[in-house]
Image: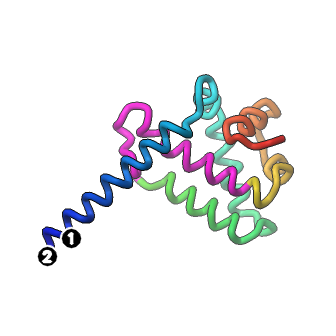
Amino acid sequence: MWREVLVAVVAGLVATWLAVVVALLVVRPRGSLLKESVRLLPDLLRLLRDLATDRSQPRGVRVRLGLLIGYLALPFDLVPDFLPVVGYADDVVVVVWTLRSVARRVGLEELRRHWRGSDDGFEALRRVAGLGG
């Protein structure tokens, strides 16, 4: 019985991992967008923190951002970080998906209001996250 459960859990984890790897290969930022996303990290972390702690934001937005910050703080990932390229790409994809979700809920103007980086940085964030503008 335990052996069957263990095999099922391992098979589920492998299937999930493969699905995430395929999603990362399809959705990952291309070319210089990946470099831009790395440069944006400090400003992006401030943006996430500011939005997550802003009581005027809808609760769902703050919960999503809190979960994202928690996910990024975890010492383990669905795709291990020691794998070249895709190891860190899962974090980028989760951040982009969350930013798109938050932008749809609060609006691009609200993201801009909380952005403390440069105008060029915000434009790069908008392009990296695929946000209209």
* Badge 1: residue crowd in 10 Å (few <14, some 14–19, many ≥20): few
Question: Based on the displayed image, in which of its 4 quarters is residue 104 positioned?
Answer: bottom right
- Which residue is identified by label 2? 1
Question: Which of the two residues, 112 or 94, is positioned nearer the viewer here?
Answer: 94
Q: Which residues are magenta?
A: 75-102
Whether residue 101 appears in magenta in the rendering, the answer is yes
Residue corresponding to mark 1: 5
Q: Are marks 1 and 2 in contact (CB under 8 Å)?
A: yes
Q: Secondary structure at mark 2?
A: loop
- Residue 2: image quadrant is bottom left
Percent from the top left, x then y, of residue 118? 79, 34
What residue appears at the point 46 percent right and 39 percent down from the top-left corner?
88
Give percent across and percent down for residue 127.
Answer: 72, 35
Identity of the residue drawn at 36% across and 44% down: 80
* Callout 1: SS: helix
- Residue type pointed to by label 1: Val
Q: CA distance from mark 1 to mark 2?
A: 6 Å
Which residue is painted at 70% across and 40% down in the image? 130
Query: Can you say which quadrant of the picture contains the N terminus?
Result: bottom left
Colour scheme in use: rainbow
Write down the quadrant of residue 21 in the picture: top left
Q: Amino acid at mark 2?
A: Met
Magenta part, dominant SS: helix
- Residue 125 against residue 13 in the figure, above or below: above
